[in-house]
Image (cartoon, grey):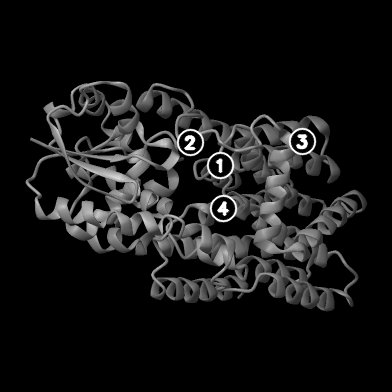
Amino acid sequence: MLGLAAFLVGTGAALFYARAGLTLSHYDARAHLVVARRIIDSLTPGWQQVGAVWLPLPHVLNMLPVQVGVLYRTGASAVALSVLSTGVAACATAAIILRTTSSRSGAVAAVALLVLNPDVLYLQSTPMTEPLLFATTTASLALIADWIMRGAARWPVAAGAMLAAACLTRYEAWPVAAGALVLTLLVLLRTGIPVGRAVLASLKLAVWPTVAIVLFLINSRWTVGAWFVSAGFFVPENTALGHPLVAWQQVREGLYRLSGTGLVWSAYAGVVLVIVSGVRSRTRAPLALLLALGGAAALPWSAYMQGHPFRIRYDVPLVAASAALAGAGVSLLPSLVRPIAATVLIAVTLAQAHPLDPRAPMVVESQLEAANKAGRRPITEYLTAHRDGRTIMMSMGSLGHYMQDLSVNGFRIHDFLHEGNGDLWNFAVGSPRDLAGWIVIEERAEGGDALYREARTRAGFLDGFDRVAEGGGAALYRAK
């Protein structure tokens, strides 16, 4: 019932943001559609188009639906996946709480705090990948809890496969998975399983995410020549560069902005209650698995320390973690107090961050690129009016979202030459006139794209091309 309610709320929110024209307002929302589409629709189609910066599962799941033009242009199939994922996350969170505490008030609180948060509601109304992260991480924890409560005698196939899926969805899942493995061992020991058997069972679970990560690293090495891409896609301009305390402060402030203080402090209290309850009760020990969700903080903290620009979106997984832990805390209160505590907590949280708030941080951040999108209209009009079938060279790392914008004008991914085309791209960078009839260069965002830097540092790069249009920080060049 809670899962159905979450699905209905999510569907209503998706329709609301679609009518408001905000479904694809975030540039990454459009870029995710492009990555999924290019696996088949490309100058060089194939598995290498999955890429090595973003993890592959969301794009593989959406690979076939987005070959349908209307689903690609609107993002409808990816939005449906996001809405369904949020429903799964709600079900999984409620299942852990109900299975370990039998508290309906705690389960209702956790689900309400998750699905009524305005930033969660917005993200699950877009093609973004965070909702799938919520689904795979919480579902894996629910399956691990079930496996432990059944004695952990068999191979954890379902739990392990779901944990592997999480590790192939977003990088936040990697520290979450590490935390889940440590907590699994501790919970197994707390439930009375001998040390040797508990260690062996934990290792069986660890096989799945380990294999998933290793396969991803091998694919990265195969497609881009590096085991792991950790630089080159942002300009290190954050003041937290090299300062762990400043980076942590940014993570903390981002979470407060997304959820308000009521949810965060309730989650802190939930952490304490979950730990105390696990120490005192064997049957409730599996509830401690929810603590692993806090591992999602490791990614933004690490990114900010490396100078990555601040992004409020990186804190949204912590909103999901806070909702689960706050609900768990409610479930551990005396039975007569639980309904009152749940009601008060939900009311306070909604007062601080009410659903469908047009000024919610995530909604505002998603529209930062709106001015550039409108500003690129002269490029779009010129390119459409003078379209001649020649290849358009464009950096997907900087302008992948613009490729999706151009789908409205009839352009497909195989009309573009981009980094995913491997050797073709490398050859074209050396001599663009031989392979491209058009070049679109991002000249402003993140200090300009790879083609902008090439043009600035190498004389003659744009020889044979005329600058014919510009706008929104980008410029269009046409071969003579």
Contact between labelled residues 4 and 1, with CB atoms less than 8 Å apart: no
Nearer to us of marks 4 and 3 is 4
Q: Which mark is residue 198?
A: 3
What residue did someone put label 1 on?
Answer: 309
Q: Amino acid at mark 1?
A: Pro
Can residue 206 be seen in the rendering of this structure? yes
Is the Cβ of the residue at disc 3 closer than 8 Å to that at disc 2? Answer: no
Instruction: State the image coordinates of residue 68 (x, y, percent, origin top left).
Output: 24, 59
**Disc 2 or 4, which lies upstream in sequence?**
2
Relative to 140, residue 371 above or below: below
From the viewer's perspective, tell me whether residue 434 is left or right of residue 367: left
Q: Is residue 155 visible?
A: no
From mark 1 to mark 3, how far is it between C-alphas?
Answer: 42 Å
Inter-mark Cα distance, 3 to 2? 42 Å
Tag 1: Cα neighbours inside 10 Å, few (<14), some, or many (≥20)?
A: some
Q: Residue under circle 4?
A: 313
Tag 2 secondary structure: loop
434 or 219, nearer to the observer: 434
Under tag 1, what secondary structure? loop
Earlier along the polypeptide chain: callout 4 or callout 3?
3
Please determine whether, in this image, residue 425 is positioned above or below residue 45.
above
